[in-house]
Image (cartoon, rainbow, N blue to C red):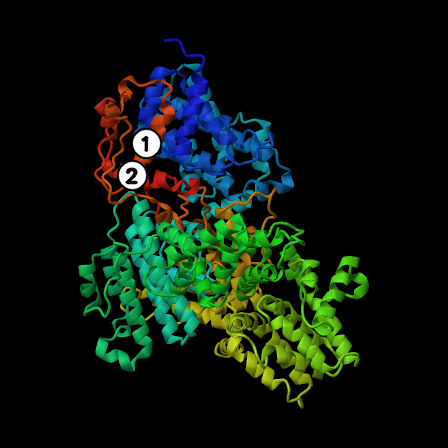
C-alpha cells in the first residue's frame, strides 16, 4: 500500500491528541496500530513525528513521551535502535547551536534507560544485526556527547558538561546501555564473530573509539571497570580515534576521574535517623513542604520499596512528635508536628495508593510502624491524666488512625487492635472532605470560608481539602477582582497564624501568595468612585495577609512570587519602613503628604477627597515619611503631644490599621538610631501599642500588626534600654509586646539554647554538632529496638551554618565521618551526614524548588540563595579531591562517597518519576461509585458506527471518549479495552488494574504526574 500523502499530518494530529488527553500507553499502542493501517508511515518518520511534538511543546519534561517511545518499541512498530537514532536527531545534545528553548535531556535519559532495561532482560537484541544496530546507535550518542564537550571552552569543560546533573546522568545512562549490550548473548556473538562484512568491522572500530572516549568520563566505578574489561577482552583499543577524541580526553581531569573510580561504595543504608532528620528540617521553622521535592527525595531514598517508605515515614513522624514532647517544644511547634502526622500523611498516602502501580497495604505499614515506637510513650487511658506529654502522643496516635480510616487506608474495625485499647472518639460522619465540594459551598455561601478556616487547625485529616478549597477560591477571587470576599478570607487567615503553618503543609508560599501579590501590584484605582474607605479597607486586608506571611517566615521575593522589579510590593518591603526627605519626594507625593497631615492633625477627620486623590499604594509608601514629619513637628514643639496622639489614633481604624506595620517598624528604628531624648517617640509607640480605646473589629487586626512587629521592636528597645538604663518607660512597652514575640517561625534558636550547645561540648557549637551526630549514629545502630528517639533539633545545624558558615560545619561532619570510618560505622554515618546536607533550609528552598518546578527565566528572575549551603560546601570540597587525596587519602574517599550519596538523594526529577501530589486527590473527579468502563466504542444505540468500521477522521472523538471513560471508571469494574475496541484479542488484551491506575493519571491533567511507567516510583 502506498503511503497516504496526508499521513504525516494525520499522525501529527493523532500524537498531539494522545499526549493532550493523556492516553494510557496500552491504548496508545492499540490506536497507533489502527492508525498505521489507515495511514502507513515508516518507523523513522513515526519517531520523528512523535519527537517533533517535544520540540514544539513548552513543557520541559513530559513523562508520557518516553513511555510512548517505549510502547512503540515493545509493540514492534519501531526498533529500539531506530528510536535511539531518532532521539539523537532531535536531542539538544546534537542541536545545541539552534537556540533551543528547552533541554531534551530528561526525555533522552529515560528512553535510553528503557532500552537498557529491554537489553538487560533479554528482550533485545534478537539477532546479530540488531545488536550491531544498537551498538551503532549508542556509539553515535557517545560521539555526540564528546563533541558537545569539545565545543565548550577548555576552562569550562568540567563545570559545563560535568557540572550539569542531567549531562552526567546521560553519560551514566549511555554507560549502562553499553554494559548491558556487552553482556547480551547476541551482543557478544557480534563482537566474537570474525565476519568479513565491512559493516560489522566499522561498528567494532567505532565502538573501540567510543569506549576510549567514554571510559575516562564514567564516574561509576562498576561501569568503568566493566567497560574497561570489555574493551581489553575484544581488543577494542580505539587506536584510530580522531584528534577531537584525543583533545576530549586530554581536557578531562584524569587524576580526579581515576581517583573517583578507585573509590568503592559500601552498602547503602537508610537509617532511622536519616528520615527523622529530614522531617525535622521540614518542620523546624517555616514548613518547607513541597510535594514534588518530598516525593523526589523519598523515591531516591527507597528506590521503589513503597511499603517500607510508608512504614518509615510514619515512624519518623511519630519520632519527631515524641522528640518534641521530650524537648518541651512550644505548643505551636507541637501543633505543627501533630498536624503533619494527622492531616498531611493520610492524604499523602491516599495519593500514593492511587498513583501506585502495585497495591500498598497501608494497614500493615501502620501496624509495623507503631510496633517500632517506644511503648512507654503511649500510656493507658488511666495514666494520661498524670502524663500530659504522653497524652499528646496518645491523642495524636488515635487521631492519625482515625484520619487513615477516614481516607479508607485502614479499616475502622482495625483501630481498636492498632491502639491496643478502645478508641476515645468515633470516625467523623461522611468521610473526608472533598475539595470541589468545599469550593462549591464557599461560592454559594461565602461565610462558609470563615468556618472552614477555623477547621484548618483541627485534627481530623481534612486540612488538605480545606486548604485546597481556600487557595482555589482565593485564586478565583483574585482573577475576578472580587476584593470584598477576598478581604474577608484574608482577614480570617491573618488572625490565625497556626492556620498559615498548616497551609504550608499543602501549598507553597508562592502558590498562596503570588495571586495576591499580583493583585496588589496591579490594583486599579478609580478616583471618581463614590466611597474610598472600603477600597482602603479591602486593599489593607489583603496586604496584611501578605505581610503576615512575609514576616512570619522571613520570605524572599522569590518565595512571594514577585517577579516584576517595578513591583509596588517590592518597593514597600524594601523601603516602606524608611522615611524620605521632602526634597526627594515628587510633586504628587508632597501634595499627598500635605493632605494626609492636614486630615490627621488639622481637619476633623479623613475626608473622601484625601483618599480619592491618593491611591492605597501611594499612601503606604508615604507612611514612614508621614510619621517622620509628624514626630519631627512634635519634637520641635510645633505640635503638642496630645494633637500628635489624637491624629495618629486615626490609624487605629480598621481600614488604615495595616499601615501600622510600616509605622511601628520605622518608629522602632527611629528610637534606636536617635541620639536625642527618646521620650516623645516612646510615648507615641506606647500609645499605638496600648491604645486607650479600640473597636472590636480593629482589635484582631491590631493583634496581627503587633505579632508582625513585636520581635524587631523588642530587639531595638532592649538596645536602647542598655544605653538608657535609668529609663522606666521602656519596660511597659516590652511587657505589652511580650505575648506576640513567638509569631515568627524561621528555625532560629534561642540565646539560651545556643549557649547550652556552645558550653556542653568540647569545640563549642561544632563540637556539639559532632556530639549530636555521634548519638544519632548510635541510635540508628539500634533502630530496630523500641527506643525513644535521640534528642535532636535541626535548629542546631541551622545555627551552625548561619553563625559559623557551611564550610566549617561540613569540616566538622567530615571529621566525624572519618572518625566513624575508623570505628566501623561509616555506612550508617554517611546516610546521616548526607541527609543533613540534603535537608531543606529556608535560604535555599526557592532554589531547590526551581529544580522540580523550573520557572521561565524570561518571565521571572531566577531565585538566589543568600548563603553558602552544606551542599555548596561539599561541591567545593569535591573539586579539591585530587589535592586532598595526596595528604589525606581517607578523607578524600569519604568526600567522594558522601558526594555520591548526596547526588543519589538529590537526583533531580529528570531521572525519577516526578509526581506533583499536592492536588491529585482533591482535583480528581473519579466517580468512585460509578460503574463506568473504558468504552472507546460508541454505542450502536446512539446510531454511531462501531470502531471496526468507524469514520477515519473520528480519532478525536475516540480519544475524548477514552479520557472521559477513564475518569468515570476508576472504582468500577473496568472491562478489557481491547475487546471494547474490537481489536484482535491477542494484541489488545488489557489488565484491568493497569487501566484503573492509569485512568487516575489521565484524570489529573498534570504533566509532572503522568509518568505511566511507575515501577519503583516510591
In the picture as drawn, the residue positioned furthest to the front comes out as 530
Q: Is residue 26 visible?
A: yes
Secondary structure of the residue carrying tag 2 is helix
Q: CA distance from mark 1 to mark 2?
A: 10 Å
Residue 968, numbered label: 2
Q: Name the residue rendered at 40%, 20% in the picture.
A: 43
Residue 513: x, y in percent? 53, 55
Residue 607: x, y in percent? 68, 65
Q: Is residue 468 visible?
A: no
Residue 421, numbered label: none
Q: Name the residue rendered at 45%, 52% in the picture.
A: 473
Q: Name the residue rendered at 19%, 60% in the picture.
A: 414
Of the pair 856 and 272, the residue shown nearer to us: 856
Q: Report the quarter where the N terminus lies.
A: top left
Q: How many numbered dots are placed on residues in this image?
A: 2
Residue 357: x, y in percent? 29, 42
Asked which quadrant contains residue 320, the reply is bottom left
Of the pair 203 and 967, the residue shown nearer to us: 967
Pointer 1 or 2: first along the chain: 1
Residue 962, numbered label: 1
Asked which quadrant contains residue 276, the reply is bottom left
Query: Compared with residue 233, is residue 735 higher up or lower down, i.e. above or below?
Result: below
Label 1 Cα crowd, 10 Å radius (few <14 / some 14-19 / many 20+): many
Residue 551: x, y in percent? 56, 65
Amino acid at each position: 500500500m502506498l503511503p497516504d500523502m496526508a499521513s504525516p499530518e494525520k499522525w501529527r494530529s493523532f500524537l498531539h491528541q494522545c499526549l493532550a488527553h493523556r492516553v494510557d500507553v496500552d491504548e496508545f499502542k492499540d490506536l497507533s496500530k489502527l492508525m498505521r493501517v489507515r495511514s502507513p508511515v515508516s518507523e523513522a518518520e513515526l519517531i520523528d513525528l512523535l519527537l517533533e511534538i517535544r520540540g514544539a511543546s513548552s513543557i520541559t519534561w513530559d513523562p508520557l513521551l518516553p513511555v510512548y517511545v517505549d510502547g512503540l518499541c515493545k509493540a514492534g512498530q519501531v526498533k529500539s535502535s531506530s528510536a535511539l537514532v531518532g532521539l539523537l536527531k532531535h536531542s539538544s545534545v546534537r542541536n545545541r547551536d539552534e537556540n533551543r528553548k528547552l533541554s531534551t535531556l530528561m526525555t533522552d535519559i529515560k528512553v535510553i534507560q528503557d532500552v537498557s532495561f529491554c537489553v538487560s532482560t533479554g528482550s533485545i537484541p534478537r539477532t546479530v544485526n540488531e545488536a550491531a544496530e544498537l551498538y551503532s546507535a549508542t556509539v553515535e550518542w557517545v560521539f555526540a556527547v564528546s563533541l558537545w564537550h569539545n565545543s565548550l571552552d577548555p576552562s569550562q569543560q568540567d563545570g559545563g558538561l560535568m557540572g550539569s546533573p542531567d549531562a552526567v546522568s546521560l553519560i551514566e545512562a549511555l554507560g549502562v546501555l553499553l554494559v548491558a549490550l556487552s553482556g547480551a548473548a547476541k551482543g557478544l556473538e557480534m563482537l566474537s564473530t570474525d565476519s568479513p562484512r565491512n559493516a560489522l568491522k566499522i561498528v567494532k572500530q567505532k565502538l573501540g573509539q567510543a569506549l576510549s572516549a567514554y571510559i575516562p568520563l564514567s564516574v561509576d566505578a562498576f561501569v568503568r571497570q566493566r567497560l574497561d574489561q570489555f574493551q581489553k577482552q575484544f581488543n577494542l583499543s580505539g587506536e584510530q580515534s580522531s584528534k577531537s577524541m584525543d583533545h576530549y580526553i586530554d581536557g578531562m581531569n584524569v587524576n580526579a576521574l581515576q581517583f573517583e573510580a578507585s573509590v568503592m561504595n559500601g552498602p547503602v543504608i537508610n537509617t532511622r535517623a536519616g528520615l527523622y532528620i529530614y522531617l525535622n528540617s521540614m518542620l523546624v521553622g517555616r514548613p518547607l513542604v513541597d510535594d514534588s521535592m518530598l516525593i523526589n527525595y523519598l523515591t531516591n531514598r527507597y528506590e521503589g520499596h513503597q511499603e517500607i517508605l510508608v512504614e518509615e515515614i510514619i515512624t519518623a513522624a511519630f519520632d519527631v512528635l515524641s522528640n518534641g514532647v521530650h524537648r518541651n517544644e512550644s505548643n505551636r511547634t507541637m501543633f505543627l508536628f501533630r498536624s503533619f502526622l494527622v492531616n498531611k500523611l493520610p492524604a499523602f498516602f491516599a495519593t500514593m495508593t492511587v498513583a501506585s502501580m502495585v497495591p500498598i497495604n497501608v494497614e500493615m505499614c501502620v501496624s509495623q510502624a507503631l510496633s517500632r515506637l517506644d511503648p512507654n510513650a503511649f500510656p493507658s487511658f488511666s495514666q494520661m491524666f498524670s502524663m500530659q506529654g504522653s497524652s499528646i502522643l496518645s491523642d495524636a496516635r488515635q487521631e492519625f488512625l482515625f484520619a487513615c480510616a477516614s481516607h479508607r487506608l485502614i479499616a475502622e474495625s482495625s483501630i481498636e487492635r492498632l491502639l491496643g485499647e478502645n478508641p476515645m472518639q468515633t470516625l467523623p460522619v461522611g468521610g473526608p472532605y472533598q475539595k470541589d465540594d468545599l469550593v462549591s459551598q464557599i461560592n454559594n455561601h461565602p461565610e462558609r470560608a470563615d468556618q472552614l478556616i477555623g477547621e484548618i487547625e483541627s485534627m481530623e485529616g481534612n486540612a488538605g481539602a480545606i486548604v485546597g478549597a481556600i487557595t482555589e477560591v482565593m485564586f478565583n477571587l483574585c482573577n475576578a477582582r472580587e476584593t470584598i470576599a477576598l478581604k474577608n478570607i484574608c482577614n480570617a487567615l491573618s488572625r490565625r497564624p497556626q492556620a498559615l503553618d498548616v497551609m504550608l503543609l499543602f501549598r507553597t508560599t508562592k502558590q498562596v501568595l503570588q495571586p495576591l501579590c499580583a493583585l496588589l501590584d496591579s490594583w486599579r484605582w478609580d478616583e471618581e468612585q463614590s466611597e474610598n474607605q472600603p477600597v482602603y479597607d479591602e486593599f489593607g486586608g489583603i496586604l496584611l495577609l501578605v505581610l503576615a506571611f512575609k514576616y512570619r517566615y522571613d520570605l524572599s521575593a522569590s518565595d512571594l512570587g514577585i517577579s516584576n522589579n517595578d513591583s509596588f510590593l517590592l518597593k514597600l518591603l524594601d523601603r516602606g519602613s524608611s522615611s524620605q526627605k521632602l526634597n526627594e519626594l515628587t510633586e504628587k507625593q508632597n501634595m499627598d503628604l500635605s493632605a494626609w497631615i492636614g486630615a490627621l492633625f488639622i481637619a476633623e477627620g479623613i475626608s473622601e477627597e484625601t483618599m480619592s486623590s491618593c491611591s492605597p499604594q501611594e499612601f503606604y509608601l508615604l507612611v514612614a515619611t508621614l510619621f517622620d514629619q509628624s514626630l519631627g513637628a512634635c519634637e520641635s514643639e510645633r505640635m503638642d503631644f496630645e494633637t500628635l496622639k489624637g491624629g495618629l489614633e486615626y490609624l487605629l481604624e480598621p481600614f488604615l490599621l495595616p499601615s501600622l506595620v510600616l509605622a511601628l517598624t520605622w518608629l522602632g528604628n527611629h528610637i534606636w538610631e536617635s541620639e536625642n531624648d527618646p521620650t516623645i517617640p516612646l510615648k507615641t509607640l506606647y500609645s499605638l501599642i496600648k491604645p486607650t480605646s479600640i473597636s472590636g473589629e480593629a482589635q484582631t487586626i491590631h493583634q496581627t500588626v503587633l505579632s508582625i512587629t513585636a520581635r524587631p521592636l523588642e530587639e531595638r528597645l532592649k538596645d536602647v534600654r542598655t544605653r538608657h538604663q535609668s529609663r522606666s518607660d521602656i519596660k511597659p512597652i516590652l511587657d505589652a509586646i511580650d505575648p506576640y514575640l513567638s509569631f515568627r517561625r524561621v528555625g532560629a534558636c534561642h540565646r539560651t539554647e545556643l549557649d547550652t550547645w556552645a558550653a556542653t561540648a568540647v569545640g563549642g557549637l561544632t563540637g556539639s554538632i559532632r556530639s549530636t551526630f555521634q548519638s544519632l549514629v548510635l541510635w540508628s545502630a539500634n533502630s530496630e529496638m523500641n527506643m525513644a528517639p535521640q534528642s535532636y533539633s535541626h535548629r542546631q545545624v541551622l545555627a551552625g551554618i548561619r553563625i559559623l558558615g557551611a564550610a566549617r560545619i561540613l569540616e566538622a561532619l567530615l571529621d566525624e565521618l572519618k572518625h566513624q570510618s575508623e570505628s566501623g560505622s561509616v555506612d550508617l554515618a554517611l546516610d546521616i551526614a548526607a541527609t543533613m546536607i540534603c535537608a531543606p533550609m529556608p535560604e535555599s528552598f526557592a532554589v531547590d524548588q526551581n529544580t522540580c518546578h523550573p520557572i521561565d527565566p524570561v518571565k521571572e528572575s531566577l531565585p538566589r540563595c543568600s548563603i553558602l549551603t552544606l551542599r555548596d560546601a561539599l561541591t567545593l570540597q569535591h573539586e579539591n579531591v585530587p589535592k586532598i587525596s595526596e595528604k589525606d587519602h581517607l578523607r578524600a574517599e569519604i568526600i567522594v562517597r558522601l558526594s555520591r550519596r548526596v547526588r543519589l538523594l538529590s537526583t533531580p526529577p529528570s531521572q525519577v518519576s516526578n509526581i506533583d501530589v499536592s492536588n491529585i486527590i482533591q482535583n480528581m473527579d473519579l466517580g468512585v461509585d460509578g460503574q463506568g468502563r473504558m468504552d472507546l466504542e460508541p454505542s450502536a444505540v446512539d446510531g454511531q458506527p462501531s470502531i471496526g468500521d468507524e469514520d477515519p477522521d473520528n480519532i478525536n472523538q475516540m480519544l475524548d471518549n477514552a479520557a472521559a471513560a477513564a475518569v468515570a471508571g476508576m472504582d468500577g469494574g473496568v472491562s478489557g479495552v481491547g475487546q471494547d475496541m474490537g481489536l484482535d484479542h491477542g494484541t489488545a488484551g488489557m489488565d484491568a488494574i493497569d487501566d484503573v491506575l492509569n485512568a487516575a493519571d489521565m484524570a489529573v491533567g498534570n504533566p509532572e504526574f503522568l509518568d505511566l511507567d511507575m515501577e519503583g516510583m516510591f
